[in-house]
Every structure is written in C-alpha cells, then in structure tokens.
Image: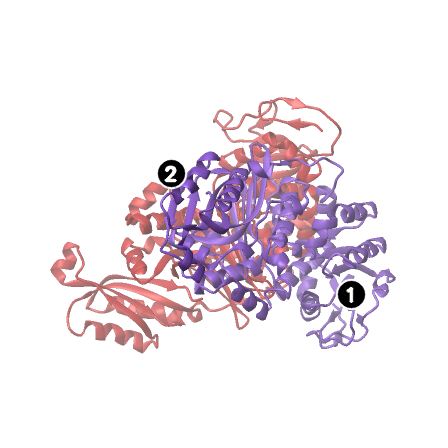
Chain colours: A red, B purple
Amino acid sequence: MESQTSGGVKMASGSMQKTKVAIVGLGNVGSGVARLLLDHGDRTARHAGRTLWLEKAVVRDLAKHRGVDLPAGILTDDVEEVYNNPEIAVVAHLVGGLEPARTIMIRLLEAGKDVVTANKALLAEHGPELFTLARQLGRTIAFEASVAGGIPIVTNISQCLSANGILSLEGILNGTSNFILTKMDRFGTPYAEAVAEAQRLGYAEEDPTMDVDGSDAAQKLAILAHLAFGAQVNWRDIPRVGIDSLDVEDLRYAAQLGYAIKLLAEARLVEGKLDLSVSPTLIKRRTPLAEVQDAFNAVRVVGDAVGPVFYHGLGAGQMPTASAVVADLIDTAVGRTRLTFETLEPFSTNSPPRVSLRNSDELPGRYYFRLRAKDHPGTLAAITGVFGKHQLSIASVLQHERGETLEDQQDDLVPLMIMSHQGAEGSARAVAEEIEALGVVRGHVTRLRVKTP
Amino acid sequence: MESQTSGGVKMASGSMQKTKVAIVGLGNVGSGVARLLLDHGDRTARHAGRTLWLEKAVVRDLAKHRGVDLPAGILTDDVEEVYNNPEIAVVAHLVGGLEPARTIMIRLLEAGKDVVTANKALLAEHGPELFTLARQLGRTIAFEASVAGGIPIVTNISQCLSANGILSLEGILNGTSNFILTKMDRFGTPYAEAVAEAQRLGYAEEDPTMDVDGSDAAQKLAILAHLAFGAQVNWRDIPRVGIDSLDVEDLRYAAQLGYAIKLLAEARLVEGKLDLSVSPTLIKRRTPLAEVQDAFNAVRVVGDAVGPVFYHGLGAGQMPTASAVVADLIDTAVGRTRLTFETLEPFSTNSPPRVSLRNSDELPGRYYFRLRAKDHPGTLAAITGVFGKHQLSIASVLQHERGETLEDQQDDLVPLMIMSHQGAEGSARAVAEEIEALGVVRGHVTRLRVKTP
C-alpha cells in the first residue's frame, strides 16, 4: 500500500486502489482534514478499502502558515488545478460564506467531482439549487459536518433511524451560545463579558451575530427538519430568538426555579403539522439537554419505533469537524454516499414537502417572562390582566426585592418573573408587547420558552 | 407504488422496485419488524428507494398469537419455504440462542440470502465462521440490532466515526441489569426483589443468569471491541463480574460517597494494548453514564479526532430492536451493507488482530471493597496490611455502625468499605482473596471497579 505522511515521506507497498482527493479551503477545519488524510493514511485506507490520496489543497494565500506540513506539490492557490484534474474524484469543499463558496461548489460539480462540505449556511440558502445540479450531473454532495460538528446526526437520521417516523427533534446546535450560557450560569458572568471570553478562546467569531441571534441554529434546524420530516423550509421562516436578549438575571431566576437556560432548536410533529422554533429555553435541570455544558452540542431525536435517542458531542472545533468531513470522504469513496443520495434525494424539490409548518402564532409552548415593573398597588393586577385577555394562564409568579440599578432605586422598579401554562406563541408575543406598553412597566419584556417534556 | 398493510389489504400503484423479505422467528422483535414493514410500507419504501415486501414469516407454532395481523399466505412453519424461494433476497434472522440459530443462518446464506440478525450470542460464539461463510458465498450479514438495541452503535462505529482511531469505549449494554440497579438505588429494593420485578415487567428472562452475571454485556463488548479496535476476542476471556454479587448496601454506600453503581463494559487502548472488562462500577453522579436510568443503554466512545461522543437510548424492547433490524433491512436492500461488509470485512480472521489484550492481572483500575469484619482492635491493621503487601494504596475507608443481622450482632461484625487508588486488577483480586482468609473477616469480600475519568 502506498501512503502519504505530513512529513513529505512517501512509501510504496502493494497496489491498493486509490481515490484522489482535494481540499479547497485550508483553514482550521481544512488543515485538520489534511492531517487526518496524511498522518492516518493507513487507517483511512483500512476503513475505506482504498487509499484516500490527497492530491491538491487549495488556499487563497500561499504564504499563510497552515499548522500542517504538506508534501511537495500539493499546496496551490489556483482552484483551476482541481477543476482541471480529471483524476481528482472527491473534493472537501471547506470554503465558508455564500460566495465564492456557491460558485466553487458549482464549478466542482460541473468538473465531475463528488463534493463533501461543512458549509451549512450554503446548504440552508442554496441547498435545492446545488443538489438539483448535482443530481443532473450525476454527482453527490455529502454534508455530515454541516450540522453538530462531530455528532454524526445527518447519517443517523438519514440512515440509522430510517425505520422510524421522526416525532420530534430537539438540539443544542450552537456551541458558541452554549459556551456563553455555561459561563453566565456557572460564574454569573454578564453576557457581554461571556461573549468576549468566547471570542478570546476562539469559540466565537469576531462578529458573533449569527451565533448569538439564533440564525446559525435556525440554519442547522432547517437542514435537520428537511432530513427528519421532509420539510422544505427557509431558515428565515423559523421563529427564532437569540441569547442576545438574555440577562444573567434570567439564568439566576431560572436556576431558582430549577431550570437551566439553553438555546434550543426544536422540531415537533403535532397533528400532522411541524412546529419549528429556536429560542433560549428553560429546561429542567438534571435532564440530559439541561446538562450540556461548554461548547458541546446535543441532539435528542424521538422516533415512533426507536423511542428517544440522545446524542452528545463536540459541535465544532478543528478535529471534530474534520472527523465528520473525513467520514464523508470515506463514505463517498466507498460508494455509500451515492446510494443514500440517489435513494433519499436530499433537498429535492421534485416532490412536494411531506409536512407543512404550523403558523408560528399557533406554535404551542410554555413561556417565561421577565420584566421590571413599578412596585405600586395595582401593578400586578394590570399585568395579569393582560395575560387573562389573551387567555394565557399563569403558572407561577416570582417577585424579587427592588432591583439594584440607580433607575430601579429611583423609580421603585422590581423585577418580576412570570411563568405561563401551555399557550400559543401568538398569545405570548401579544402579552409581551402589551405589557411593554403598560405605564407601570419599564423597558423590554424578555420572553423565553419553557421546555415541556 | 404497491404496498402491504397488516390488515391484509394490498394496494397497487406504480411500479417501484421490490425487494422481497422474510422473517425467520416471529417472536417479540419479529412481530415488531413485521409491523414496521406492513404498517409503514410507504415510509420504508421512501427511505429504501424500493418496496420491502414481506413475503414469508416463519414460526415454530402456527397456533400461537402474534400481536400482528399478517396478510394471507405469509405465515408458515416451514423454513424451507424461505430457503427454496429464490425471490426472497433478504432475511431477518430473529432466532435466539445458538442452535438451531446457527444452522438456520448457514442455510440462509447457502440459499443465497443476505441476512440481518439480532442474535449477539450467535455472533460472539460463531462470528468468524458465519462471516467467513458469508464472504465465500458473496452474501452479507448485518447486525445493528445485536448490540444496544435502538442505539445504532454498530453503524456509528463502523461508518460514522471511521475517520477516528478509537481510544476508548464504555457502555451500559445490559438493560436488565440497569433496570435492577435503578430499582435498588432509587427505592432500596433488595437485589432478589428487583430481579423479580424485572421479570414481572418483562425486562428479565425467566432465567436471567446471562444478564446479571455480565455474560450478555461481555458478548456485546466483544462485538464492539472487534469493530472499534480490530480485536479478536472470545467473550469468555473478558474479565467480568456481574451485578449478582451486589448487595443493596453497596448502592447505599456508593451513594454516600457520591457514586452510582452501573454494570459498565469498558474497552480502553492503553500503550498499544486493549483493556477489556465488565464489572459493576462506581461512577461519579451527575456524569452522563451515572444518570442512565431503568432499561436504557448508553455508550460513550472517545475518538482521537472527534473526542467524546455519547449515545443514549432504549437498549432492548420490541420496537427499538425492530427499528435496528429494519434499518439493516433497508441498508441491505439499498446496497450500503454490501459496501461496508466488503470494505471492513467484519469478523475476518484473514488478517491478524490489530491489538492484543492486556493480561487481566495487569488491568489498571481503582477498586471498591466491602466486607464484614470483627469490631476488634487490630482488625483494621490486619486488613490494611494486606493492601500494603500488594502495593494497592488506600484512598478512603468508611466504617459503619454494627450491621443489623443476628450474626452481625452476635459476632460484633461491622461493615467496612475501602476505596483504593489506581492499581492492578491482579493486586485487587489477591487483596480480596487474602482478606477473605483473615480470621477477623466474615464471608465474601465484594470487589467493584471505580470509574476513573
């Protein structure tokens, strides 16, 4: 067997079949993929039944340090060398963002390459276009790494749980948010400080907006909802609230009530309609999802045959993501990807969606509200009156001592937490808006979901 | 698309490709498989890209009630109808035990069928023989359901984590034991009573020996160790202790020390050698494995790229196991099973094992000992002297008030719990044996493992 090593030494022995591979985009994940292919060529060959031979690695800037030592002739800044090399069969497409990522994927497919990608934004935005093109050209796209990093949730839903009708899927899909929430919960770190620490440790981007406002989780949920339920949903249509609306007080109050707060992405089939949401959610402590710490991800799937299956692992980071990419490279080289791709036709728009989304106003849930209100007689009556008007019944009220800010002191403001029974999202939204407009309430009303079992 | 239903109604529409399937053994799991195929034919067809058509279901006793309503012509008590029907391509082999299960599988393979099985004892005992035969005949054997029921751990190790070198694997693989331990822990139920309750609820067999003595878990661990590490190990060579050695006192003392006790199956690669063991193990509470309750199973795999991945789900029961069997039927019909089977060559003895087992005497671990000793001066010195002799250092000692039995009262016996630091299994075994022989100690010394992080 012939093998490569990152030291540039090549050994020849035997004549194992060879699949030539390229990496486009040698950032953090790309370097990890290169390391797995080069340093563990024997292992990969054993699991693939053939050598995965790294032929080219395309970068934008040849001068930049990579953290991986490539044999001579592999590194290039010209992606045409990949398009134009008919021997390269499979390409790890590790370019972030929408463009030029989209154009590069199209060119790769047109050049006859099977593609493996980690770019969930690209799939969430252009999935149907790219997968239709791949099918027309007889090519495949694998995307295990696009959701939940090291947790192989795409294969598990598409293949391992294929005997099931999926009833629900809940996930902590954004490691950045979970890291920030863990800091806030464990150390009482204020939100802004926790964000800064996440950035310092490399868990958050310089601009963490997509992570903390729920967009990233919504994109991943759109992909999983497609695989699990046959939904065809634009991620922007998923009702979403980010953790950027949270105050460290919310985590403290939640803890007093026996809950942790997690950014939860939920998909649930109820009476034939699909409920989708992304929201910071109060989850009973000592349940598996509530105990997911730091940058870990977790997914809980309930199938009508298998019952609940819970997955927990690293949702991001160089090697966990590279693990998913290389698994896809192996699946593609072995031929499993093609079989699954042709059978399940992911992101196909040939057949109508199998489920429709519930109108988000009708989405059922329990809710937690936090607000600051005047410590005057009649205040609570005015607030609870709004709940009554919208037929959202109150499960518990927690009123604390006067707040600590100067404004709280001067204006006699007390923090008030209200937990509702089950109600509709539309009612909860209306309640929050009307309460905000009351004269006795100051500022924004925080509204979070409460996980029902 | 043509489809079957369990009501016996058949509908014809379209001309989807059809894979004819048989079930041999229509017990609890077999009936579940039949229900999934019959009641959810459309779904299965969508996930398989072809209809899985239930052609025959073989039973021993035609008169026995099945809990599933089969269309006419399917039920038979003559397995030859399966062997001799060349149209049947795939067979769910759901016969327990070793014989006639082994002979039936051989006949199925010889008749040109691809086989799906849930029989882990058969694989643990005759895996190499059966898989070699399948390869010679150009057939496949799929066995997702043989380990951990609804948790798709076989596919996850063989395929999803294929980019990784597996460093360790820990599992709660016997739901019966875990159900019994949960009862003992939560309600202080004595062992024998908890076993009886497990039997009453259908979680334990009439003869639960293989479950409670660790044999079942050892068989599953042997299969997983083969897949994850390339080990070729006879399950009888895995050092194993069952929960039948436990007293409810052990769970109480463990709780006082902050631990739960679980029947843990462990495989760990240390310095190129594989450590395997099955033992009731003290696990720190509030860690995922310690919180696995009732008849659930869980597996924690650590890969050198992906890091830790944790799986939790129902390890047994009709529909979870049927979910795994039907996933295998779909994989086999689609062709994925063949690709994986030919690539990984499971249970092949063509190549030497990739790892050797550590001599069980050298197996490292921390240990918990419980014994009853005379409440006399010098007793503790005699006992701790034995530890010193075998260089097993003591981490903590817990001595309780005199025991409650008549013998304890008359003979001044007190319960004594000793937790060791890291040491070798051989030393721990020798310590237990020598302490048992001391005049100041009465009866059996219970020795359990303590999970190190």
Name the element at disc 2: loop
Along the line of sight, which residue is nearer the eye, A17 or A424? A17
Vertical placement of residue A344 versus B53, above or below: above
The outermost residue toward the left is A410
Q: Left or right: where does residue A174 sit relative to residue B222?
A: left
At label 2, counting other C-alpha atoms closer than 10 Å, the crowd grade (few under 14, some 14-19, many 20 or more) is few
Residue B68, horizontal then vertical, whole percent: 70, 74
Residue A443, horizontal then vertical, whole percent: 23, 61
Does the rendering let one see residue B286? no
What amino acid is found at the position of numbered circle 1 in the picture?
Ser
What amino acid is found at the position of numbered circle 2 in the picture?
Leu
Vertical placement of residue B235 versus B38, above or below: above
The residue at which mark 1 appears reads as B15
Q: Left or right: where does residue A8 sit relative to residue B191?
A: right
Quadrant that contains the N terminus of chain A: top right
Does the rendering let one see residue B110? yes
Along the line of sight, which residue is nearer the eye, A413 or B192? B192
